[in-house]
Image (cartoon, rainbow, N blue to C red):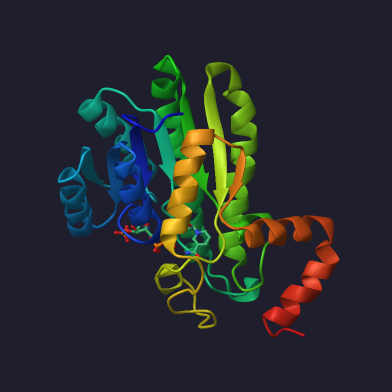
Amino acid sequence: MNPSNRVVILTGATQGIGRATARTLAQAGCFLVLAARTREPLDTLAAELNAGPTQAVAIPTNMGDTAQAANLVRATVETFGRLDVVINNAALGVRDEVVDLNETEARRVMDVNYFGPVALIQAAIPHLKANREGGLIINISSIVGRRAMPGIAGYCASKAALEKMAESLRIELKRDNIRVSTVYPGVTATRFNDHSLGRSQSGRGRLAGVPPERAAQTILRTIRHERRDVFVTLFDRAFVTAGALWPWLMDQFLSRYTGRS
Ligand SMILES: NC(=O)c1ccc[n+]([C@@H]2O[C@H](COP(=O)([O-])OP(=O)(O)OC[C@H]3O[C@@H](n4cnc5c(N)ncnc54)[C@H](OP(=O)(O)O)[C@@H]3O)[C@@H](O)[C@H]2O)c1
């Protein structure tokens, strides 16, 4: 769809890929409903975007709470009168091998990365259906939702759940003209690992990888072209394809790469 004048809910909007996406979509003429837990950076970002060509509102939201996730839709419709695009971007990692995975933390990751997005989608569906041109749901997954890595199983499982849910949802919503896309970023230069739960220290620190602006451009392209599965880089696509075609070879590669062989 043409992004201009579309009303977009964007979760996890204040840092990393979310913040870059907010700026990119604002430039493209989207009206933005920005969500994250912490009020101050949300207000700062909304003020920055409102100084430009578009309108942005900040709604503090914890996506780990399904009632708050659903409330985001109510606030959007109250402010803009409609909703066109939902972008489930907020997520939380957990860095532990399965043997050490803490159940409370693993459930929290599922709450933020899976149950919150499902609640947001459920609340959004009636409003997307009501549009003459339908609507678009974009879930930000990860390449590790398609091919899991050791040491982050709790996170990989939450992203795989999101992707499988989207596969069903896409077909369920087809006749209502609501489209569903999944974006699979690979390693992106954000503070995501610093924010992750878990006790393992391996891989902590600011991530090397592509700048978040590159993922933001991919998300804008996803709004424009509404493709089903979208990768940010060719390497990310190759990683997932190789993992599907030669899983045993990928097992060997990943055990070497992560120092486990
Ligand atoms: N960075 C990577 O290498 C990478 C790779 C593949 C996929 N991804 C995916 O890309 C997306 C964005 O990741 P990122 O690296 O940009 O993350 P990030 O830098 O850690 O930023 C996370 C954003 O989400 C918000 N957030 C965290 N927990 C939340 C909650 N419970 N409710 C609402 N908002 C919450 C944060 O603000 P508050 O703390 O104020 O809530 C912040 O705005 C995620 O879905 C992630 O899984 C990232």
Residue 247 in picture, x, y percent from top left: 81, 62
Residue 87 placement: quadrant: top left
Vertical relation: 108 (above or below) 227: below
Vertical relation: 31 (above or below) 24: above
Which quarter of the rendered image does ligand 1 occupy?
bottom left
Q: Nearer the viewer, residue 4 or 61?
A: 4
- State the count of labels: 0
Residue 233 placement: quadrant: bottom right
Q: Which residue is located at x 31 percent, y 37 percent?
A: 72
Residue 229 in picture, x, y percent from top left: 62, 43
* Side (left or right) of 221 relative to 100: left
Residue 126 placement: quadrant: top left
Residue 54 in picture, x, y percent from top left: 22, 38
Q: Which residue is located at x 60 percent, y 60 percent?
A: 156
Q: Which residue is located at x 48 percent, y 35 percent?
A: 224
Vertical relation: 261 (above or below) 164: below
Regarding residue 219, the answer to whether it shows in the image is yes
Regarding residue 62, the answer to whether it shows in the image is no
Residue 257 in picture, x, y percent from top left: 69, 80
- Quadrant location, the C terminus: bottom right
